[in-house]
Amino acid sequence: MGIYNRDYFRNDQRRLREGWLASGYKWLIAANVVVFVLQLLVTQTELIPVDDQHVAQVRIPIVTQAFELAPARVLHGQVWRLVTYAFCHDVRWVLHILFNMLFLAWFGATLERMYGTREFVMFYLLAAIVSGLAFVALAVVLGDPTPALGASGAVMAVVALYATHFPREEIYLLGLIRLQIRYFVLLYLVYDLWPVLGALGGGGQSDGVAHSAHLGGLAFGYLYHRSGLRLERAWDGLKRFQPTWKRFRSPSRPESVRLYDPHEEREQNLDVKVDVILQKILAHGEASLTDQERDLLRKASQRYKEKPRNR
């Protein structure tokens, strides 16, 4: 298999024609924007007593209350909030959604080309769930009922996964400070870990930021890469699973057993690594490769030459 047979080296006219329909990260951004608008528009007015003689009119955001990550409500069975909270943002601070969506666009586009639309969307949604669980877990430990909202946890998983592939890629912090993305992730880790440790030590958590959700997202993005997990493959495997009673009722016939082949697994891992390196060349040029990556490409090229072709 030659390297120019890879999907992202082909002139894929179908992808160009489909535009938004072929892009998962754009659909995720669109969903966040739609929910944000609904948060602003779908409200109801309630009268809140101020004192014995006066009342005040308060606008209650219905969508926010229905979607936010309220720990007590999750523990009482409203588990959908572990996903929906990641599509809500603070309507009083537009930079909240703006920065989250910019990060999702900057790093999500490359990751989606590398992993495919279905795998990337599944990764993003599971990252939101893991981040939400991390927030709920800390809230239970601290006895804090404060709800959370925002895509930051899932977005931090995207940033962490991108950094594992391109650790030396440089970004501009605040538009001024040039910094390798691995150090940016490290700074964010310290920024989120410090207040969580302080809260666990009895110092309280009062800055209004869901640091535990950020940490959950960072951990999930890193472990996803380290474990070689593929959610699409795991989901398809679950769909093919048959309960034991069905297998006993099926007609008895000899089934072909496929033995574990470590050589095949090594070949698959090599293909994944080559895909990542080729994507890096496509995005940043051959000069961005490290000596280790160049050596891996040479070994892969030699192995592909020696591998027999199917006739």
Image (cartoon, helix red, strand yellow):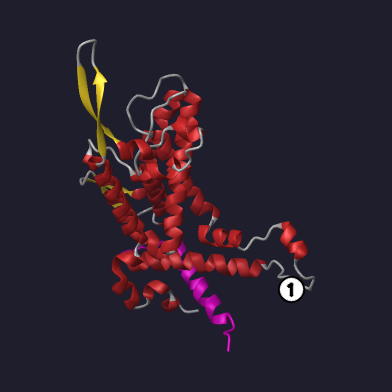
* Residue 265 sits inside the magenta stretch: no
- At a point 80% along the width and 70% down the height, the residue shown is 252
Taking 107 as reference, is 46 left or right?
left
* Local secondary structure at mark 1: loop
**Nearer the observer, 299 or 143:** 143
Quadrant of the frame with the C terminus? bottom right
In the image, residue 46 lies at what x, y percent? 26, 27
**Nearer the observer, 130 or 46:** 46
| Span of residues in magenta | 284-311
In the image, residue 141 lies at what x, y percent? 50, 26
Residue 95, quarter of the rendered image: top left
Residue lying at the far top in this picture: please name it.
52
Residue 131, quarter of the rendered image: top left
Prevalent SS, magenta region: helix
Taking 131 as reference, is 90 left or right?
left
Taking 11 as reference, is 138 left or right?
right
Classify 60 as above or below 100.
above
- At a point 33% along the width and 29% down the height, the residue shown is 208
- At a point 60% along the width and 58% down the height, the residue shown is 238
Q: Residues within 10 Å of mark 1 (few under 14, many from 20)?
A: few
Answer whether residue 287 is visible to the viewer in this image.
no
Q: Which residue is mark 1?
A: 256
* Residue 303 sits inside the magenta stretch: yes
In the image, residue 153 lies at what x, y percent? 39, 43
